């Protein structure tokens, strides 16, 4: 596959964070479809969205070395590992999280072959930490930091899995319930010192 042009990269990087919806001229968007970086939704208004390959191009372009605060105007779920505040606070943050979650549910409907809203989609499997963190934050769980001693979501060497830790068994169980309601499968494990943690993976069926 040919690498995207500079114009195509700009369009990809400007895609909506939650849904991957694209903006551009018909010719530009059709070019992304031919490059298999986008698809045209069959239902009106026939919007264009990033394919998994398009999401990878955008992710590679950003290539963050570690979790960082999102640029202004771009939503990022709180993983609990941030070293600086991410996004707004209070009711504004709640609205951002709700909008991002609703966008993700719509993305599931559009990109899962059976239209399922209950099962994670390809974008989530390609952005495991952010997807799990969004499921937790949307469910009302508190992330660590910002005055909270809450959950932390971190990557693992295992394919399609993240680690979730919480300060108390009750908080960890709340995270498990939130993830399972969001379509993730979980398993609980113990460190050598007895500390409990959860491995979570997007459910495929």
Image (cartoon, rainbow, N blue to C red):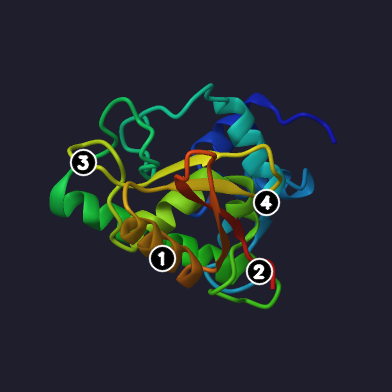
The tag earlier along the polypeptide, 3 or 1, is 3
- Above or below: residue 32 compared with residue 137: above
The dot on residue 94 is none
Q: What residue appears at the point 42 percent right and 68 percent down from the top-left corner? A: 177
Residue 101 rendering spot, x and y as whole percentages:
40, 61
The tag earlier along the polypeptide, 4 or 1, is 4
Mark 4 residue element: loop
Mark 3 residue element: loop
Q: How far apart are marks 3 and 4 (CA)?
A: 29 Å
Residue under circle 2?
A: 112
Residue 120 rendering spot, x and y as whole percentages:
59, 64
- Farthest top residue? 65
Residue under circle 3?
A: 88
Q: How far apart are marks 3 and 1 (CA)?
A: 22 Å
Residue under circle 1?
A: 178
Residue under circle 4?
A: 51
Mark 1 residue element: helix
Asked if marks 2 and 3 touch (Cβ < 8 Å), the reply is: no
Let me know if residue 148 appears in the view.
yes
The tag earlier along the polypeptide, 2 or 3, is 3
Q: Distance between the residues labelled 2 and 3?
A: 31 Å
């Amino acid at each position: 596959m040919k690498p995207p042009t500079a114009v195509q990269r700009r369009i990809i990087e400007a895609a909506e964070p939650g849904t991957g919806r694209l903006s551009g001229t018909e010719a530009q968007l059709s070019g992304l479809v031919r490059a298999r970086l986008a698809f045209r939704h069959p239902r009106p208004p026939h919007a264009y969205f990033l394919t998994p390959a398009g999401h990878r191009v955008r992710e590679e372009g950003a290539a963050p070395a570690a979790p960082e605060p999102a640029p202004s105007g771009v939503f990022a779920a709180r993983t609990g590992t941030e070293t600086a505040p991410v996004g707004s606070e209070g009711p504004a943050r709640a609205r951002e999280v709700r909008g991002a979650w609703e966008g993700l549910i719509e993305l599931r409907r559009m990109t899962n072959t059976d239209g399922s809203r209950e099962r994670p989609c390809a974008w989530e499997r390609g952005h495991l930490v952010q997807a799990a963190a969004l499921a937790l934050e949307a469910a009302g769980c508190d992330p660590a930091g910002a005055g909270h001693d809450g959950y932390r979501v971190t990557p693992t060497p295992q394919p399609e899995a993240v680690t979730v830790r919480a300060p108390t068994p009750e908080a960890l169980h709340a995270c498990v319930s939130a993830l399972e309601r969001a379509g993730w499968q979980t398993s609980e494990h113990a460190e050598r010192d007895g500390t409990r943690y959860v491995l979570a993976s997007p459910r495929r069926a």
